[in-house]
Image (cartoon, grey):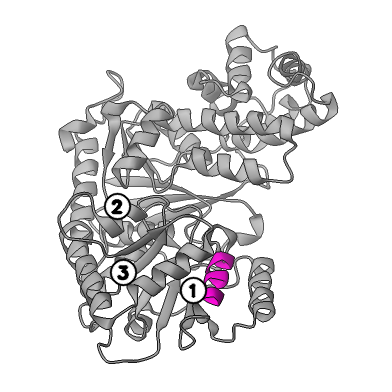
Amino acid sequence: MKICLIVEGCYPYVVGGVSAWVQMLVRQMPEHRFVIVSIGADHRQRGRFRYDIPPNVDELREYFLDEPIRREETSRPTHPPPPLTDAQRRALLDLVGGSAPDWPVLFELFGGADARPVQSFLMSADFLALAAALAEGPARGAPFKDLFWTLRSMLLPALELLHCPAPAADVYHTVATGYAGLLAAKFSYFAKKPCLVTEHGIYTREREEEILKADWVPGYFKPTWIGYFRALSQAAYRQADTIVSLFRGARDLQIALGAEARKCRVIPNGIDADRFAAIPPPDSSPHPLHVGAVLRVVPIKDVKTMIYAFHLLKARRPDATLDLIGPCDEDPDYYEECRDLIRRLGCPDIRFAGRADVTKRLPGLDLVILTSISEGQPFVLLEAMAARRPVLATNVGACREIIEGARDGLGPAGRVVPVMSPEAVAEGILDMARSPRRLRALGENGYRRVMRFYRDRDFLAAYRALYRHCAQNTDREGDRTWQASALN
C-alpha cells in the first residue's frame, strides 16, 4: 500500500515528539511505501533534515508557507476569470467568518483543473467585495485598510496550498488539522481515496491560545483569526474517514469542535520500552538530587517556569542539580533569555546538555519534569517511566492520564501540577524526592503503566489495522464514510 503522510511544522526539520512519531511509524512499517508531504513556515528550512529518511519513503515533497506554490500549467488563461458564483462567494465568506464552508466548492475553485490563480484573486474586485462584506458584518468597526491586509495574509497560504498537486496514494493521512489537514482533505477529495486524521495536540485550541497571547494580532481581529483556524479544521474533520486522538479527553475536544463522534477513536502513543530495560531504578543510597528535563528549548515548553521552580527548590535542597537535555538552537532568542534568567537568579547548577541519547542520560537522573503549556501525549514522560523514573508534569494534554492512570489501579507515577506555577513544581519535586523509597515506588508504578498501555507494538498494530481497513474501502464513489467504531 502507498500512504501519503502530510505533516506540518515538524518532520523532518524539527526534532520532537511528532517527528519521532512519524519516523517510528514509517520505519516500523517496511511493508508499506510512503510519500511524505511536509509543510514548513520558512523556505530556508528546505533540505535541512534532522532525520534520516527511511528507505520505504518514495518521495518527500516540501512546501513552505512563505513562498508561492509552483504549479505546472498546460496553458495560461487569455481572459480574466468569471466573477465568483453565489456558492463560491458564500464559501469564502464562511471561511473568513469562522463558519463551516462548503469545502468542495473551494477545492474546485482553487485546486481544480481550472484553478483560479491566488495572487490575481487577492487583487480582484471579488476579493475587495469579500473584504467589504466582512467589514459590514463580523469585522464591523475595524479599520478597513487593516482588515484588507489581514484578510489577504490570512487566505494567502491556505489558497496557495490548494494548488498543490496530489501525489498518487491509497490513503491520505494527516498528522494535524490546520494546513496539513486542509491539504489531506483536498488530496482525498480529488483522488477519491480515504483520508485519516491523527491529532497529537488539538490544533484549533493551540492556535487559539497563540492568537490570544499574540501581540501582532489586534484585539478586534483575534476572533476572526480564531474562527478561521476553526474553519480550516473542518476541512479535515469532514473529509476524514477516521479521526484519531491520543487520549479520551482529546477525543471529547474534537467532537466539541465539530468532528463526528462515530469517526473518532483513540490510539495512544507507544514506545520501544526495551530500549530502557537495562536502566536500573534510582539509587537507593543517600546522594544529591538529580532532576532532568528532556525538551526543546522553546517557549511552548515554558523553560522559564522550570528555572524559577529550580531556584525555589535550591533553597530547600541545595544539593539539587537540573539538566536540560535537548536542542537549544530552534529559538536562539528564547535560549538566550533562559540563560540570562539563570544568571540573574544565580543558579549555576542548571546545565544545558544539548542533544543526547536519553538512554545514556536517564540513568543519572532521579526524576524527570516537564512544564509545558501545551502537549499531546509526551514521549519524554513515557520514556522516563519506562526507565523507572518518576515524573512531574503540568496538567496539559494527556499528562494527567499518563501519570495518574485512568482508573487502572496501578497508582501514581509522579505529580501533576498547574501550568506556569513554579511554586507547585518545586513543592511537587520535594514531595516526590522526600525519600529514595518513594522515588522507587513512583517509578515502578510508571514502569508498569507503560508496559501495560504504551508499547509501540500495540500502537503499530492499531495503525496497521486502520490502513488495512482503508485498503478494503477504496471505492470513493459511494458513501464517503465508514464506522471507525468497527475498528475499536
Residue 383 in the figure: left or right of residue 76: left
Position of 32 compared to 321: left or right? left
Query: Residue drawn 48% across and 81% down?
Result: 316
Name the residue beneath numbered marker 2. Answer: 401
Q: Say few, some or many: other residues with alpha carbon within 10 Å of mark 1 (under 14 / 14 to 19 / 20 or more).
A: many
* Closest to the observer, 322 or 17: 322
Q: CA distance from mark 2 to mark 1?
A: 24 Å
Mark 3, residue position: 383
Label 1 is placed on what type of residue? Gly
Quarter of the figure with residue 28:
bottom left
Q: Quadrant of residue 209?
A: top right
Which stretch is magenta? Answer: 303-312
Q: Position of residue 225 (x, y in %)?
A: 64, 33
**Closer to the camera in the image, 458 or 87:** 458
Q: Is residue 368 above or below residue 395?
A: below
Which quadrant: the C terminus? top left
Is 157 left, or right, of 362 in this rendering? right
- Ranked by sequence position, the earlier of labels 1 and 3 is 1
Q: Main secondary structure of the magenta part?
A: helix
